[in-house]
Amino acid sequence: MSKIAVIGYGVVGSGTVELFETNKKSICEKVGRDIELGYILDLKDFPDSPFADKMTKDFTDILNDNEVEVVAELIGGLHPAYEFTKQLLEKGKSVVTSNKELVAAKGAELLKIANDNNANYLFEASVGGGIPIIRPLHKCLAGNEIEQISGILNGTTNFILTKMIKEQMSFDDALKLAQDNGYAEADPTADIEGHDACRKICILGSLAYGKHIYPENVHCSGIKNISLVDVEYASNAGYSIKLIGSVKPNDEGKLVAIVCPMLVPKNDILSNVNGVYNAICVTGNGVGDVVFYGQGAGKLPTASAVVGDIIDALKHQQRVLALSWDESKGDNSFMTSYKESKTAMYIRIECDDADNFKRSLSTVFGKVIFIERENRPDNELAFITKTMVEKDIDTELTILSHSAKILSKIRLY
Ligand code: HSE
């Protein structure tokens, strides 16, 4: 009997077991043989679970059972996920995962181990939850040079920003709601500070451009400093604030990758992606723009991608699906700093006399667009600069900081 095993019985693990058991008949038909859930590995006890007889705390039960062909690693984090995955692949078992932290840190290495052992390492669920993006990028769009990948890659932060924009809900209340819904990471800092989105843009960039992009080489800032005041100014100027991840080659072919909040024009498709939904825009030199949209987090949407990978791995036993990219440790020469890129910037400052200060701003930034809000304090000013090289904006802001306090600085999409 062919078996699968699930490591980690949290939100995604329990969703995977639920979806597998619910759709078992059609899954077995798709694979062409009977498949059983063999084991669920978790350190916690689940005595009341209908799958209590499948529970184990011993990883070697899975590793040493020759009937286990595919393992879903759904514990997240680097350790012991890395050690488990490596050992399973070395034994020729395929591993599927939603663990973006591990894929972003060790993807090139684990894909090579899988390849060397005639096994597959699949991670459709690691980016965009239930949205198909890994396969489309790797297969359907393979005929294109990818000019840009950008999008909303984190459900938790998009849920929080949507609540702030549409209901003026406080950041803390919106985060609590996202956690209650099972969207957030175990430590929500990874969501809030942009690290989760950063791991995802690294995976997409590595796949599209063929070299491992490491998260530590990508500028990443999150949403914890976004205030309702910025949300209001942005809205009055015709924008929504979204956490955007983006990777693209510049004119010299070097990659620029960044994760940060951006002001997205309200008529842009990304501006209308709300709640836990994610959207990923890919531009190819043949296809033009394509957008992938769907639920980017949550139990069953993410399980949908995991179970899809399980089926694919079972159908391709002993055949490698050729997913790979090159290791790039110690060589960052194919990337360049975002500071060299051009952007317009939303800036909010505190100064002595805002109306008076407006005049001196033009000597620093040239023409800017001022934004108003109801009951704007006399000592507050918000404006959008023209499009400039980012390091030049920084130089001007340093000059400005001698006579004003910089409260917010957000790039335009
Ligand atoms: N915490 C992640 C998110 C889960 O909010 O998008 C899905 O990767």
Image (tube, helix red, strand yellow):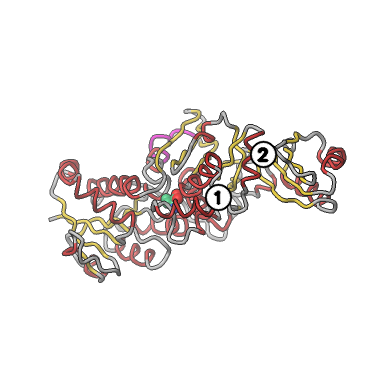
Q: Provide residue 233's location: percent of width, then percent of height.
A: 67, 39
Which residue lies under the disc numbered 1?
170
Q: Is residue 296 above or below residue 189?
A: above
Quarter of the rendering occupied by the C terminus? top right
Out of 65 and 187, give the one closest to the viewer. 187
Quarter of the rendering occupied by the N terminus? bottom left
Q: Would you say 170 lies left or right of 345 here?
A: left
The three-letter amino acid code for the residue at tag 2 is Tyr
Which residue lies under the disc numbered 2?
233
Give the residue drawn at x 72%, y 40%: 375
Q: Provide residue 35's location: percent of width, then percent of height.
A: 16, 51
Q: Is residue 365 above or below residue 198?
A: above
User: SS at mark 1?
Assistant: loop
Q: Provide residue 386's location: percent of width, then percent of height.
A: 74, 35
| Residue 245 in view in this figure | no
Magenta range: 137-144
Quick one: label 1, few (<14), some, or many (20+) residues within 10 Å?
Answer: some
